[in-house]
Amino acid sequence: RHRTSANHRRTVCVGLMKTGDPNTELGHSERQTWSRQMDFIMSCVGFAVGLGNVWRFPYLCYKNGGGVFLIPYLLMVFVGGVPVFFLEIALGQFMKQGGVASWNIAPLFKGLGLASMVIVFFCNTYYIMVLVWGLYFLAHSFTSPLPWATCGHEWNTVNCTTNFSRHTGLRKVLRLSGGLDEVGDINGYLVLCLLATWVIVYFCIWKGVKSAGKVVYFTAVFPYLVLVVLFVHGVSLPGAVNGIIYYLKPDWSKLSEAQVWIDAATQIFFSYAIGLGALTALGSYNRFNNNCYQDAFILALINSGTSFFAGFVVFSVLGFMAAEQGVDISNVAESGPGLAFIAYPKAVSLMPLAPLWAVLFFLMLLVLGLDSQFVGVEGFITGIIDMLPSKSFLGSQRREVVVAICCFTCFTIDLSMVTEGGMYVFQLFDYYSASGITLLWQAFWECVVVAWVYGADRFMDNVACMIGYRPLPYMKWCWSYVTPVVCMAVFLFHVVNYKRLVYNAVYVYPWWGEMLGCFLALSSMLCIPLTVLYKLLHCKGSLMERWQHLTTPIWGRHHLEFLPHENEARLLPKAEENKNTLLYESVI
């Protein structure tokens, strides 16, 4: 049976190289692979399942109709999340390259890889600040009473109250200045936390997937264990049932509101980490015949299941908090950092054995974000190493040196976020650099290039070449029609309904701050059209000849297995890749 499957796979792949460029270059002959396939699954779970599953989905669910929100959410999972999730993993596995070089499948659109690298670099830079705050809170959770449970501290204002207020902020941690233009002093404690976090990330990935694949077993499993413990404890608290009912109570009128569908689609692209290129990098370390199609559905089930379960954990505790303070649950329900660092810690402070639950919560928060962070950095490093010429300074260095340079660069930029004006910088990155607009733009072009430039049927054949059978036709229809339409519709909705960035509903960012934010967004989005324009202008021949040449795939060494013998001579390596192209990509 194995021989029959192998013969079928070879038959499917026999025409793989027939339309290849006779002057193609051969890719890397050796590449690390996961020690076990479970390493890959755990890494994807660790990356895709992050803080957004815990602090964003539950809030969106209750705000958008409770249980009714699951209808648009699940629909978007199957027409948006899973198709692009699978596309990115399969692309990396087939091309055996990271986020940039994998787009050699259609070299004219290599800007897609560059755009994903820019986005993931920004994410790696600002996302780690959440871990820094979590580490700081964790270090202060071993006291009784908890520091944020009472007033009378030197960082409290005269308006301090023991009742919940969503405007209390993180005064001790942030020491917030008056605005973006007031940098203020650097917080020494946060610098130490920042340094410690980057050191942890470095040693998790410095040896590549062989080391990272082992770490993710802890970082992926531990948060689930803590979530279960917090859930068991949460449902035993008075008022917890009311919180869960509030979380799931259906409001059918919401189903007709466009914002509900927009929130569902945006949450999918955020929580599935679409468009960041890290999934492509993770897939590139798979064995060529790994069943990535099956993996995509398993990971989707884990990801969405985690989001749904986290709602029970969060709202059972918020229900208790509302009952304790005699207020409506809507007054204590928060999303984002407000839930993690204001609402939930306050609720924990009201519980018996408060330090224990605080330590567990912040440890879970730290680990949950840590695996997303180091897998994101790994995806960026993979793209950098694949893109660097072997004779360049960085290309000739050991992997450990390249990782150290990248981590130090991000650390240096992060110093702007541990100042008194750091929160304004953080929110600027969060709102613009990896926003719904940039991710939707990226996902739209990924689907268009694979389905219409390379060919949906052709890519389906390539997948069959790897796994031995063709995926369901629905996947092809999603890549070709449904997913691009959904992405562009939601993208246009965000553009038309754009609102100025405001912090804490009080501080309005200055015009130059918004311009800086637009630059962060456009720095990734413009990589795609600029690269297309550059390559077309620097190619010879008529427009059709240029298009034909630039959309011809550049294959790697591992594809030689599927070549007919008479076509092997067409895979002679180029003497040297165009230096101008390398310079252009390096500048971007």
Image (spheres, helix red, strand yellow):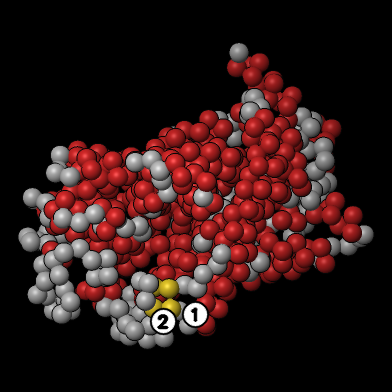
Residue at horizontal 32 percent and vertical 68 percent from the top: 195
Which secondary structure, mark 2?
loop
Residue at horizontal 27 percent and vertical 59 percent from the top: 331
Q: Nearer the viewer, residue 568 or 458?
A: 458
| Residue located farthest toward the right when viewing the structure as drawn | 542
| Residue located farthest toward the top when viewing the structure as drawn | 1
Q: Position of residue 43 (x, y in %)?
A: 43, 44
Q: Quadrant of the C terminus?
A: bottom right
Residue tagged by mark 1? 513
Q: Quadrant of the N terminus?
A: top right
Count of residue discs:
2
Q: Position of residue 156 (x, y in %)?
A: 16, 76
Q: Position of residue 581 (x, y in %)?
A: 73, 65
Q: Is label 1 in contact with label 2 (beta carbons under 8 Å)?
A: yes
Residue tagged by mark 2? 180
Residue at horizontal 73 percent and vertical 54 percent from the top: 107
Q: Amino acid at mark 2?
A: Leu
